[in-house]
Image (cartoon, rainbow, N blue to C red):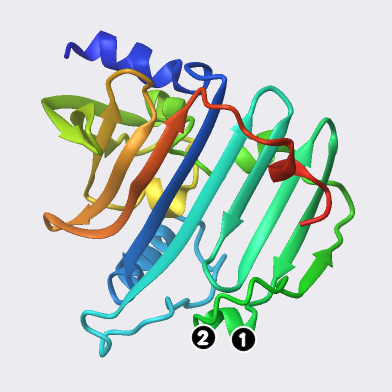
Amino acid sequence: MRLGDLLLLLYAARDSFSSVDVAWDYTYDDAAMNVILERWMSQQPSGQFASLKATGSEGDAGSMTKITRRVWWRKPACWRDETGTTSRMVTVICDGAGATFALEANPSDAAGSGSGEQSPVRRLYSSSPPDIEARLDDVPLLDPSFLLTSHTLEPLEETVYLERQAIRVRATYRKGKNRIYEPLFWGTADEYELLVDQERGILLRYAAKLEQREIAVASVRHVAFDQPLSDDLFAAAI
């Protein structure tokens, strides 16, 4: 794929579907994230931040953190995202109304009893209701257009991922950019490897690399486009 075609694909990704159901895992190396934090802090004005450490430490070699996420988006106005597995954070938005909930794990369900009892729900309140554009900002795989202004992109080869045609891409941050999406992740690694869906332009997988080693990876495990999404998904009560 030519670079120009890749740029157009990424730019139009969020407009390439009428609905999407996508689930992915985000996994990162706890100890390596300390290197990322140090790099990021070194780019900030002197004295702005105290010393920070990620969850892991140098002694936690091989320790990994995994976060599971899923999004349903029925354009233009209905959205649902979930973070977590047994205990989940859920945000539901539809036709201008929205709310965020905490779903606590049902002990019997967690034990595999299959009782089907409703898990306890706790509604979280904020000064303003959730907004789809704000939620989308936290899901770069659905709108990777930000990469066009902050990274040098190099198409490498065609491949197949989840039975979908994809293009493997190397991305490197162009230092000195004042505006960059999520700089702690996208502005600190040596390079990034992307798998771009050739039909839709979304990121099926993206990874941050330090010294040629993947230290943080987001990998889609399910995606479906333009399928009917039930009103029940976006109901105010979960």
Q: Residue furthest right?
A: 127
Cβ atoms under marks 1 and 2 closer than 8 Å: yes
- Give the labeled residue for mark 1: 107
- Is label 1 in a helix, a strand or a loop? helix
- Give the labeled residue for mark 2: 111
Characterize the local packing of mark 2: few (<14), some (14-19) or many (20 or more) Cα atoms within 10 angstroms. few
Residue 137 visible in the current orientation = no
Closer to the camera, 64 or 209? 64
**Where does the C terminus fall, quadrant-wise?**
bottom right
Q: Residue at x 40, y 66 (%)?
A: 37
Q: Residue furthest bottom?
A: 59
Quadrant of res 28: bottom left
Horizontal side of 92 relative to 53 (left or right) equals right
**Where does the N terminus fall, quadrant-wise?**
top left
Residue 169, given in percent of the width and then of the height, sits at 20, 31
Q: Residue at x 51, y 42 (%)?
A: 139
Query: Tag 1: residue type?
Result: Pro
Query: Tag 2: residue type?
Result: Ala
Residue 44, given in percent of the width and then of the height, sits at 48, 56
Quadrant of res 152: top left
Horizontal side of 161 relative to 14 (left or right) equals left
Horizontal side of 228 relative to 123 (left or right) equals left
- Measured in 3D between alpha carbons, the distance from the residue under mark 1 to the one under mark 2, in whole angstroms, is 6 Å
- Is label 2 in a helix, a strand or a loop? loop
Residue 183, given in percent of the width and then of the height, sits at 45, 48
Compared with residue 29, is residue 235 higher up or lower down, i.e. above or below? above
Quadrant of res 173: top left
Compared with residue 165, is residue 64 higher up or lower down, i.e. above or below? below
